[in-house]
Amino acid sequence: MKDHIFASWREEYIRGPKEEGCVFCRIASEDDKDKENFVLYRGPQCYIVLNRYPYTSGHLMVVPYRHLAEFTALTASELTEMMSLAQDSVSYLAKQFSPQGFNVGMNLGQSAGAGIEEHLHLHVVPRWTGDSSFVSTIGQTRVVSIATDRVYDELKSSFR
């Protein structure tokens, strides 16, 4: 007998309309919709946004405003701001959710796993012991314990 786990919140992603253009450029231009877009912070050259379809609760991304795909095209200033914001993100996530570890990095290009390869972004993913359990490794199912809108509400004040 096979067990079923329902993740009905993913229906929007699977069945919903696919966005034309760059989602990160759209989010960057909609500064009046930060809550709707889950933007936690806007800096001079980069912003921080929660992943709408997270790997784990609290999965966020640091995104440069400038539309570019090549890591080597980042200016020293953009790179410095991205790393500084990633460091802040790790600190705030650790304080709020007490993960046992983090994955911090970029997937550059489709073969490296980039879902949005035309606009690079840095992932900060909190990790807990056991989050790669049977359900994830054998069942090929991800369990996200805290809803993204709730994570947003809990983290937003940290990034002010």
Image: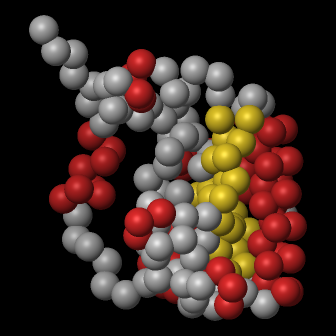
Nearer-the-camera pick, 69 or 154: 69
In the visual, does 19 lie left or right of 3? right
**Farthest residue toward the front?**
111
| Percent coordinates x, y for residue 12 in the rendering | 27, 56
In the visual, does 25 lie left or right of 134? right
The number of callouts visible is 0
Give the quadrant of residue 44.
bottom right
- Seen in the picture, residue 54 relative to 6 is either above or below; the reply is below
Tell me if I can see residue 102 in this picture.
Answer: yes
Residue drawn at x 23%, y 64% as measured from the top left: 16
| Percent coordinates x, y for residue 68 in the rendering | 57, 88
Nearer-the-camera pick, 130 or 93: 130
In the visual, does 12 lie left or right of 62? left
- Seen in the picture, residue 27 relative to 132 is either above or below; the reply is below
Nearer-the-camera pick, 155 or 82: 82
Nearer-the-camera pick, 61 or 146: 61
* Picture colour scheme: secondary structure
In the visual, does 100 lie left or right of 14? right
Residue drawn at x 30%, y 58% as measured from the top left: 13
Tell me if I can see residue 38 in this picture.
Answer: no
| Percent coordinates x, y for residue 35 in the rendering | 58, 65
Which quadrant of the rendered structure holds the C terminus? bottom right
Give the quadrant of residue 138.
top left
**Farthest residue toward the left?**
1
Which quadrant of the rendered structure holds the N terminus? top left
Residue drawn at x 64%, y 74% as measured from the top left: 63
Residue drawn at x 44%, y 61% as measured from the top left: 113
- Seen in the picture, residue 67 relative to 141 is either above or below; the reply is below
